[in-house]
Image (spheres, rainbow, N blue to C red):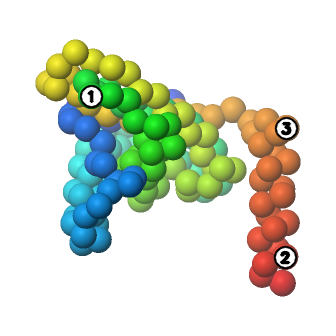
Amino acid sequence: MAEATANRLVVVIPGRLPQLANGRRHPMATHRVKAEYRDRLYFQALAQLPRTGWRVQPGQRRKLWVTVRQCRPMLDPDNCVANCKPGIDAAVRVGLLAGDTRALLHLVVEQVAVRHRTEERVEWEVTEAGPISVLDRSFVEQMRQRDARADG
């Protein structure tokens, strides 16, 4: 299910996020899980784009709000973000986001408890982000300087 307007696109994926952080499984099994989830989000978002014409311009900053609704215990915040990575990659690939760097993406991940497994889903909402704050600007500038030193 997906919903789109001129400034907002919401894609809902039924079920849970793929469990990638701290996983003890074969690397190819992990790859298959990532690819399946990435493709689900990619094709649902791609189906919405022709109706809205909603695309990001190169270098345009976006806000990605991920709401994870699950009935089991909540994940660590950093593990939840790590499990969102295949979806973020799909959003970049389909053209919803210009990139997944801090300069181009404002990521917010929220977890909500639900009562039953049938209510479990992940909502991916992409909107326009405001300008980078002073703190973020200084961080981005520090990262650029570090990269320039590493390249030079």
Drawn side of residue 143 relative to residue 9, left or right: right
Answer whether labels 2 and 1 touch (C-beta < 8 Å).
Answer: no
On screen, residue 7 above or below 43: above
- The residue drawn where x is 14% and y is 24% is 118
**In the rendered image, which residue does mark 1 sit on?**
72
Using a 10 Å C-alpha cutoff, classify the residue at mark 1 as few (fewer than 14 neighbours), some (14 to 19) or many (20 or more): few
* Amino acid at pointer 2: Arg
- The residue drawn where x is 38% and y is 22% is 112
Using a 10 Å C-alpha cutoff, classify the residue at mark 3 as few (fewer than 14 neighbours), some (14 to 19) or many (20 or more): few
* Amino acid at pointer 3: Val
Residue 91: x and y in percent read 42, 50
**In the rendered image, which residue does mark 3 sit on?**
134
* Amino acid at pointer 1: Arg
Task: Residue at the far top: name it.
Answer: 115
- The residue drawn where x is 41% and y is 27% is 111
On screen, residue 106 above or below 149: above
Along the viewing direction, whichever of 125 and 68 lies nearer the viewer: 68
Q: Please identify the quarter of the rendering in which residue 114 is found.
A: top left
